[in-house]
Image (tube, grey):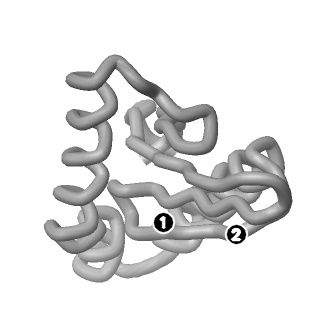
Amino acid sequence: MGKKEELLCVFRGADTEWEAICLDFDIAVHGESLNQVRDLLIYAVDSYIEDAAHEDELNKNRLLSRRVPWHVRLRWAIEFLFHSVTNRRPETEGRFVLLCHA
């Protein structure tokens, strides 16, 4: 496909209720563990990029530039800032980076 691009993804959860979202493509998944939502999100993002590659150039560009709404990104930024300032980082939420071909 194309070059590798880093995509920002975040997760939150506890016990058997977890969610993860790719902030760069507005793709979310739900699962029973951190590992499960990470794997599900990787699969969902890879599938999304693969499907977008088969679209005409206009739709492909539109799909590959889709982002979460600004207020969702702002909410996560505020949470990360709060945890950084207070020196507390809960084990039940965080972020990870996916390396994808875009």
Ranked by sequence position, the earlier of labels 2 and 1 is 2
Q: Position of residue 61 (x, y in %)?
A: 26, 68
Out of 60 and 46, give the one closest to the viewer: 46
Q: Is mark 2 on a helix, strand or loop?
A: strand
Which residue is pictured at 48% across the width and 65% down the height?
Answer: 53
The residue pinned by badge 2 equals 30
Q: In this view, does 55 lie above or below 90?
A: below
Q: Position of residue 90 (x, y in %)?
A: 53, 34
Please give the label number shown on residue 92: none
Mark 2 in CB contact with mark 1 (< 8 angstroms): no
Q: In this view, does 1 lie above or below 31?
A: above
Q: Which amino acid does label 1 sit on?
A: Ala
Q: Where is residue 35 in the image (x, y as percent from the top left)?
A: 80, 42
Which residue is pictured at 50% across the width and 38% down the height?
Answer: 94
The residue pinned by badge 1 equals 53
Q: Which amino acid does label 2 sit on?
A: His
Q: Please state which of the two labelled residues, at mark 2 or mark 1, is closer to the viewer.
A: 2
Residue pushed farthest top? 87
Answer left or right for 81 relative to 21: left
Q: Position of residue 71 (x, y in %)?
A: 17, 69
Q: For residue 29, what is the image quadrant?
A: bottom right
Q: For residue 91, what is the image quadrant?
A: top right
Answer left or right for 75 relative to 40: left
Answer left or right for 61 relative to 2: left
Answer left or right for 27 relative to 19: left
Which residue is pictured at 24% across the width and 59% down the height?
Answer: 75
Which residue is pictured at 22% across the width and 73% down the height?
Answer: 69
Badge 1 local density, few (<14 within 10 Å), some, or many (20+)? Answer: some
